[in-house]
Image (spheres, helix red, strand yellow):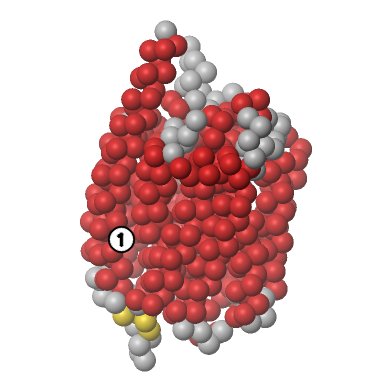
Amino acid sequence: MKTAKSTFTGYQAFIVAILTILQFTIILDFMVLSPLSAILLPELHISTAQFGLVVSAYAFSAGASGLLAAGFADRFDRKKLLLFFYTGFILGTFLCGLAPNYHFLLIARIVTGLFGGVIGSVSYAIITDLFPLEMRGRVMGFVQMAFASSQVLGIPIGLYLAHFWNWHAPFLLIVVVSIVVYVSIIWKMQPVTAHLALQSKQSPFRHLTKTISKVRYLKGFGATTLLATGGFMLMPFGAAFAVNNLGVTMEELPIIYMVTGIVNMLAGPILGRITDKVGKMKMFIFGSVLAMSLVLYYTRLGVTPLWFLIILNAVLFLGITSRMISSQALMTAVPDASDRGAFMGVNASVQQISGGIASAMAGVIVFQNATGHIERYPVLGIIVALTMVITIFMMYFIDKDVTARNTLTKTLTH
């Protein structure tokens, strides 16, 4: 007979499902910009640096709002907090769907980031409140399906809509899906308020400063800074690199995203279960070594057969997904119960700000020459690989801290 620790209750299954779909809309809103780069660069008559700014504008505004909200994150029902920020995210995405030019799009991305950047931290706080550490690998495995789903369903559909209609269509699609998720949260999610009983009477500012001054929390923020580098550096120009350097056509591009996403959608829950079984740190090392090896190889490719690119992308994303599941599951164990919302908020801000810097740097490092080729992409590969090496060591010390605290807690409990 299965115990509560080996299977989800019906309500837990709903929470996992709705947070996965919610993350799908948030991630798709960010990820869809990468494949649209091949369309937006010529259509809006913008440079790679300007496009990098569009990506980083979301990240910087998300980081700023996350820091501002962190002090208040543990003082409200997490359901109400989730709905508030999701409302703003839907509005910002709708503005992206109406944007007539580059500057309007830039402002719309800032609005979307102000609200969307906080949602992930609230979601992870809810997961930490409702699921024990022994189950979080599996939960993260399902939640990470949002990335794969955005590739399987969102990005290909978005690309086809953008190709046959215009580039605004993917954003309007996200708005429609988000409204359905919003109604479902109102309808069925119960209030998440257990953390309120743990709060002291200190001011939100004091709560924030206490959170960002704890040494073990700073280790987590440091690791998150480097974890964000890979996605924000490589992804914004991934589609432009594939089309202009690897010989992929706009019609073939959705196929790569779709097949890669299907593989990762199937693998996510399996990788999550393996993470809980073999350990978060071992899984993180495996994913990092696999990802950095393929990143260094991929960024140096020239014109390549489609079938080989599909296989390469699928395996690369298996490595990336393994890193994300294991690192996020481990990171949820870092904060004390009374600091979860604040820690997750600051952590999300650090991720967004460092990611914004990374994407802005990427836009300066690479450039598009007269023939359309994306130049200096291998430089990004080297930088990303180096950050992965450093992050392994940082996560090792975080894992040691978490293990020591869990052992102490069990000893005191018994």
Above/below status of 240 relative to 214: below
Above/below status of 237 relative to 394: below
Which residue is pictured at 61% across the width and 45% down the height?
205
Q: How many marks?
A: 1
Quarter occupied by residue 111: bottom right
Find the residue positioned furthest to the top.
414
Q: Which amino acid, mark 1?
A: Val
Which quadrant is home to the C terminus? top left
Which SS class for mark 1?
helix
Which residue is pictured at 45% across the width and 27% down the height?
133
Which residue is pictured at 73% across the width and 34% down the height?
188
Q: Name the foreground residue: 126 vs 24.
A: 126
User: 372 left or right of 85?
Assistant: left
Above/below status of 16 relative to 253: above
| Residue 254 spot, x, y in % from top left | 47, 66
What residue sits right under mark 1 in the picture?
A: 384
Q: Name the foreground residue: 176 vs 247.
A: 176
Which residue is pictured at 56% across the width and 52% down the height?
67
Q: Residues within 10 Å of mark 1 (few under 14, many from 20)?
A: many
Q: Name the foreground residue: 235 vs 251.
A: 235
| Residue 342 spot, x, y in % from top left | 56, 41
User: 368 left or right of 340?
Assistant: left
| Residue 383 spot, x, y in % from top left | 28, 64
User: 175 left or right of 288?
Assistant: right
Viewer can see residue 222: yes
| Residue 333 spot, x, y in % from top left | 44, 32
Quarter occupied by residue 238: bottom left
Viewer can see residue 252: no
